[in-house]
Amino acid sequence: MDIKRNTYSPEWHKAIFGYLCKIYPSRPQLYLDWWLTVIDGAGEECWNKVVFITDDDRIIGCSLASVFRIYVDNKVETYFTSGNTILNPEYRGKGLSKYFYEQVNEFDNWIRVGFTDIAFKVMPRFVKNFAPINPVNVYISVNRAIVGQLFRKLLHKKNNNKKGFPSDITIGAKSRLKRIDNLDMLTIPSEGHWTKDDAEFVRDKTFIRKRFFEIYCSDKYGIYEYLSNDKSIGYIVVRKAVYSSQEMLSLVDYRFYSRKDETKAFIAVSRLARYNNIGLAITLTSRNYKLQLCPLTIKMKKKLSCATGMKSKQAIFDDLLITSADSDLDFVYYQ
């Protein structure tokens, strides 16, 4: 064997794409190609954080990366996260995972979401700066359309409701959702700084455009501004999903100017789910919310572990709002 650790450059796009398609037959090829294309355009800042392992120039493992920005004490800092990390099964058990850990040890400015239980236990032994932060919680919201959904499932019938995402939908007496079809329709605070949290992912026009409008599956997302008394108080992003064979509406992302308004996102996604005759909504978020009765929202026992390499910032990252949009959870946790 001639095992080597390599860092990325766009000339490897095709070869790594082929490897990922073979090793992940259940993941959409458009998704895998999209992630590599984003890496291509991100430059060396991202390339040197992507690692792939070869044996005689044959790819036998890889770990992709994505670069993002976070406000930390009102200053923008650059971080990266890993995803699609996988070693060819033929080479497991030979200590080759060390190449992934070596790559992580070259940088501290990383945040990772959704570790496997095994990886979360093993990584602290090999990664010099490993600081756990609050996990991502899984919330399930239920609305009255659940009765019809369960009945259809019992009879093995599909949901024939093709309504999709309306341009405008009422939420109670004073609030409504306005669908955003282009970024000029959305009110975005200066420099994408929404909250007063000590640490916050940047949510500016660039992020929203690239993540939801220019992505390969942009037609799947419904982006809405949340209006209260015709005043913008935040936004939500949803898409239809399947989890554990159950049809759901996923709350992929949300931001509100006031933290006390964040639970309105559960009301909004449940209203859109009911409109589509879907009885369940799923939300992945690092926030800890109390039991919601309207709509009935339950925090599941399942938690997705998170960690950072910045031990000095562990405390403030504990309060960082993380959603499905901040990692690969939107693509691999549910269909």
Image: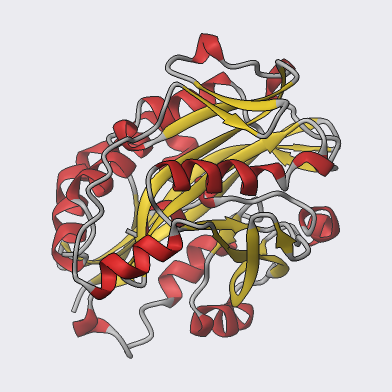
In this view, which residue lies farthest toward the bottom? 93
Residue pictured at 72% horizontal, 60% vertical: 292
Q: Quadrant of residue 202?
A: top right
Q: For residue 83, say whether it is visible.
A: yes
User: Residue 221 location in percent, x, y?
Assistant: 39, 35
Q: Is residue 99 above or below residue 170?
A: below
User: Residue 79 location in percent, x, y?
Assistant: 61, 44
Q: Is residue 307 above or below residue 126?
A: above
- 306 or 216: which is nearer to us? 216
Q: Is residue 122 above or below residue 332?
A: below
Q: How many marks?
A: 0
User: Residue 57 location in percent, x, y?
Assistant: 16, 61
Determine whether, in the image, residue 100 is placed left or right of residue 285. Answer: left
Q: For residue 43, say whether it is visible.
A: no
Residue pictured at 66% horizontal, 18% vertical: 188
Determine whether, in the image, residue 227 is placed left or right of residue 66. Answer: right
Quadrant, the N terminus: bottom left
- 281 or 255: which is nearer to us? 281
- 294 or 321: which is nearer to us? 294
Determine whether, in the image, residue 74 is placed left or right of residue 168. Answer: right
User: Residue 61 location in percent, x, y?
Assistant: 28, 67
Quadrant, the C terminus: bottom left
Q: Is residue 30 above or below residue 180?
A: below
Residue pictured at 43% horizontal, 27% vertical: 210
Determine whether, in the image, residue 277 is placed left or right of residue 227. Answer: left
Q: Which scheme is used to colour this image of the protein?
A: secondary structure
